[in-house]
Image (spheres, grey):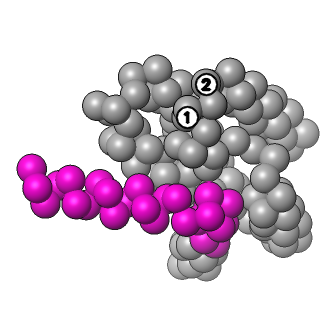
């Protein structure tokens, strides 16, 4: 388990460094992927603590749920940035590929996800979506509305 934590924390530091190198004009678009935000840290700690009490399968279910929510959020960002900013799109694309690898690894570790683990994953996924929304001060909602409006006009 310590190895997984080292990988995830190491990746988080690498992502933070990559996004800090993005020019300031991108700060609003990148804010949701920068680790270190107090809301995300507290939410992550609580989710990790509670699921650790459930044992390894709880930890893997939590990891898979968080990674799935992050993956959806990154997909939204990529779609939004596709024709707006190719540099930032490339950075987030690389992050998404790492997150997808984490998701696949976590799902492989789940021995037999039954109704209880599926319910836990759904609950954690919703909580992660809420934490992302809170950490971006609603920017993720504004981005989603802009994407929906663009789809209606195209």
Q: Residue at x 57, y 45 (%)?
A: 28
Residue 148 magenta? yes
CA gap, disc 1 and disc 2:
6 Å
- Residue 74 in percent (x, y) is at 48, 44
Q: Disc number at residue 23?
A: 2
Label 2 SS: loop
Q: Name which quarter of the figure residue 78 lies in.
A: top left
Residue 113 magenta? no
- Residue 59 in percent (x, y) is at 76, 59
Q: Which residue is mark 1?
A: 26
Identify the main secondary structure in magenta: helix
Q: Residue at x 53, y 25 (%)?
A: 91
**Crowding at label 1, few (<14), some or many (≥20) Cα neighbours within 10 Å?**
some
**In the picture shown, does residue 33 fall above or below 47?**
above
Q: Residue at x 36, y 43 (%)?
A: 80
Q: Are marks 1 and 2 in contact (CB under 8 Å)?
A: yes
Return the residue nearer the eye: 104 or 108.
104
Which residue range is magenta in the image? Answer: 127-154
Residue 48 seen by the camera: no
**Crowding at label 2, few (<14), some or many (≥20) Cα neighbours within 10 Å?**
few
């Amino acid at each position: 388990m310590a190895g997984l934590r080292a990988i995830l924390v190491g990746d988080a530091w690498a992502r933070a460094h990559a996004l800090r190198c993005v020019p300031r004009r991108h700060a609003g678009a990148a804010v949701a992927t920068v680790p270190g935000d107090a809301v995300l840290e507290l939410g992550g700690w609580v989710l990790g603590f509670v699921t650790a009490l459930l044992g390894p399968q709880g930890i893997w279910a939590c990891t898979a749920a968080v990674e799935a929510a992050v993956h959806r959020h990154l997909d939204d960002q990529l779609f939004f940035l596709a024709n707006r900013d190719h540099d930032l799109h490339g950075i987030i694309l690389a992050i998404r590929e790492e997150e997808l690898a984490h998701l696949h690894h976590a799902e492989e570790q789940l021995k037999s996800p039954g109704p209880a683990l599926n319910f836990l994953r759904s609950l954690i996924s919703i909580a992660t979506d809420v934490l992302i929304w809170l950490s971006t001060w609603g920017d993720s909602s504004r981005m989603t509305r802009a994407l929906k409006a663009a789809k209606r006009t195209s």
